[in-house]
Amino acid sequence: EVLAFDQEMGRLVYKRTGGPLPGTSEWSLTKTASGTKVVYTNYYQHDLTSTVLSSITRAMERFLNDMRNAIEKEKS
């Protein structure tokens, strides 16, 4: 469920329901002199175990690496 969307400000907030990690997520994109700064923030409804946090961290690291590789490939 989208809670907020502002294309001009580059902001999207949505609610996660029905899955194992309910809460909200927010994407914020800001143009900079060298490109675009992306901030992705998750808020979880419940406390997370260290195992779940480790899994989420690994998944985000893979996601960011995939994004970096795609950008570098596009530049070349």
Image (tube, rainbow, N blue to C red):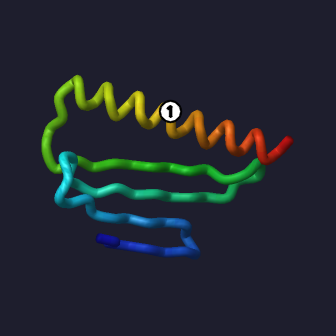
Residue at position x 46%, y 57% in the image: 27
Q: Look at the picture and state if 57 lies above or below 4.
A: above
Identify which residue, 21 or 24, lies in the foreground: 21
> Dot 1, how many residues are within 10 Å of its Cα: few (below 14), some (14-19), or many (20+)?
few
Q: Is residue 11 left or right of residue 14?
A: right
Residue depicted at 71% across the width and 44% down the height: 71
Quarter of the figure with residue 50: top left
- Tell me which residue sits at (54%, 74%) in the image: 7
Q: Position of residue 58 (x, y in %)?
A: 41, 28
Where is residue 43? Give x, y as percent. Answer: 27, 49
Split into 4 quadrants, where in the image is the C terminus? top right
Label 1 belongs to which residue?
Answer: 62
Residue 26 vs 53, above or below: the answer is below
Give the SS element for disc 1.
Answer: helix
Q: Is residue 24 left or right of residue 7?
A: left
Q: Which residue is drawn at 48% across and 31% down?
A: 61
Could you tell whether 19 is left or right of 54 in the image? Answer: left
In the picture as drawn, the residue positioned furthest to the right comes out as: 76
User: Which of the 4 image quarters holds residue 5?
Assistant: bottom left
| Quadrant of the frame with the N terminus | bottom left
Q: Looking at numbered disc 1 in the image, what kind of residue is underneath it?
A: Arg
Percent position of residue 28, x then y: 50, 58
Left or right: residue 23 versus residue 68 is left
